[in-house]
Image: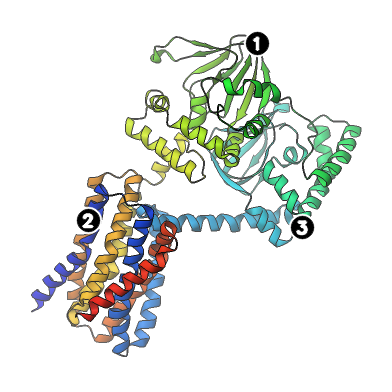
Amino acid sequence: MFETIFWNAFVTGIISACSMPLGSITSIFWQPRNRALAFLIAFGGGALLAALVIDLVGSAKEKGHLLELIIGSIIGSLFFSLVDHIVNKSGGFLRKPSTLLTYLTEQESLRFEKRITQLKRLSFFSNLPQHWRKKITQFFRVANYPKGFTLYRQGDLSESLYIIDAGRLDLLDPQAELMPLKHLNPNDVFGMLAFLTGCPHQTVAVVVEDCQLAVLTRTDLEELLEISPYFVQATLRYIQSQEVVDYLQKRQGLNQLEVKEWTHLATDYIQRERKILAAVPLEQKEAEFLHYARQIRRFDIFTYLPQSDLEEFAARLIYRNYQSGSLFFQPNELSDNLYFLHQGQVEIFYPIHFNKPSMVLSTGDSFGELAFITRSTHTVSAIAKTDVGLWVLRQQDFEELMYQSKSLVEAVKYYLDNPNLRDYLQKRQNFDSSKSSQWVKQALENMNAGRLIPSIKMMEDGLNKHKDAPMSIWLGLLMDGIPEALTIGAHMASHPISATLIAGVFIANYPEALSSSKGMKEQGFSIPRILIMWTSIMLLTGILSALGSVIFADAPDSAISFLESLAAGAMLTVIAQTMLPEAYAKGGSIVGLSTLLGFLSIVVIKSFE
């Protein structure tokens, strides 16, 4: 009798979980659209919900074990949430889209709260009402920069205000042979003086430890000035402060009369136009760039841009003159600028192992474009062959323009899907064909989702950061299956298992495996690896079900009810925390009906028992 229950529990556990490898196999041949996948996930969630209510919650209530039901459910929910959090921190959130969505939502919420705290500590924002600080927080975007990246140089146009979320950055002083002027750490703000006076930067900002920055752009600043009288007053107070006066005199070289005149004009300009008036304008030659833009070679993204977007692009460029022999970049330097030649010639030198002769560029050519667009290190040297005049576009300005212009995004997507780019990644950045395709795919997906193009270094660091992710993903999948496995075993130790419970678990497991397998493939997991992971979970579900039937063979009914309530609390948390949010994110309003249909399917099955 005992042996029969043991093997019955094992087989029942296998049956309930065999839909997992079945779902992963299906993902090989079928890539369902989001609404179809949402329907299946919500249907499975509804079916599992009905099975839990009928067979676990209802069973405990009928036995009069209400206290065990309440306490067990709460403990099960809290325990699942705690273990889920621990596993996710190690990369387990990658196991399925729902946990990834939850993780990203939590991270965004934490960033939001952190940003509000940061703004409270800044004198410029401290006097603003709380609801305006929250409003301003929504305007900040997040950008990541690797160690060694030069965020801006002396003379660069100031178009952004920065707050350090993570990492470290040094401000170097050109007036003191580029010695560190200030070491910046998390929560430090920088770039504010140049930003609010419209002046070129007079320091050099270099990332010394991979940085995550919160960035407020000039476009967003001016939008805030349009909608917030409080922000207008805060800006006016700041530009009239002694700190700004000292900065303009000591760093920008303005005399007292020039500062006074600018303050008067800037105050009027902010009140009237809701814009910042530049105290020290930069040479940009916008009209000349617009004349050349649509004929620029080697980076042909301007051909079909609307004129208004082209003008926004030209407004971000800085015009610079260089003497013959000037070095723009050399191999292994991180790319932070893109160059457009206006006058003169630049020679590109390839390292000896490339076996390529040097190339001379002239008016209308761009250079540094491939390293710039992939945010990687240069693989060639660029040297001015004659005196040259050119336009410079900084990486962060390009990123900000991408957020503002859909046409620019489409032009860049077209450029990314060029075979020349994959050839560059393989021959110059030493990517294999799979990795280069993966980078291009990730870049296009990021752009479709309104995020930044991933840098090569960030992609490699991301893989290293989550090098334990496969084990964490496996543990996460196992954790999701443990409650149902032990419940099956405990249930069978006292009485025959209900068909509705098995059906509910089976139906819920299929779309979960289908969706998760799709996500794991996108993370770079091979098909055999995915199948092995799901098959091992199925086998362990059978083993745990069998063990549960042994452990709880002589347990009193109250203990069985408590265990079932633990499992019910954990599985209800899975439904509410992962399954339904993912379904809604993919399918929207279809979730309500599909959840109901899943619930009713179990009710119908129950009626035939």
Q: In this view, does 60 lie above or below 77?
A: below
**Of the image marks 1 and 2, the number of the one nearer the N terminus:** 2
Q: Is residue 190 shown to the viewer in this render?
A: no
Q: Where is residue 27 in the image (x, y as percent from the top left)?
A: 27, 50
Secondary structure of the residue carrying tag 1 is loop
Observer-nearest residue: 206 or 70? 70
Residue placed under numbered mark 3 in the picture: 127
| Placement of 389 over or under 260, stated as above or below | above
Left or right, 209 with respect to 420, comes to right
Amino acid type, mark 2 = Pro
Quarter of the figure with the C terminus = bottom left
Disc 1 to disc 2, C-alpha distance:
66 Å
Give how far apart the Cα atoms at labels 3 and 2 are: 58 Å
Q: Name the residue under label 2.
A: 21
What x and y, as percent, mark residue 416? Answer: 45, 31
Find residue 390 and report its horizontal and vertical position in percent: 64, 19
Q: Which of marks 3 and 1 is nearer the N terminus?
A: 3
Q: Residue at x 78, y 32 (%)?
A: 251
Question: Which numbered tag is attached to residue 387?
Answer: 1
Report the amino acid beneath label 3: Asn
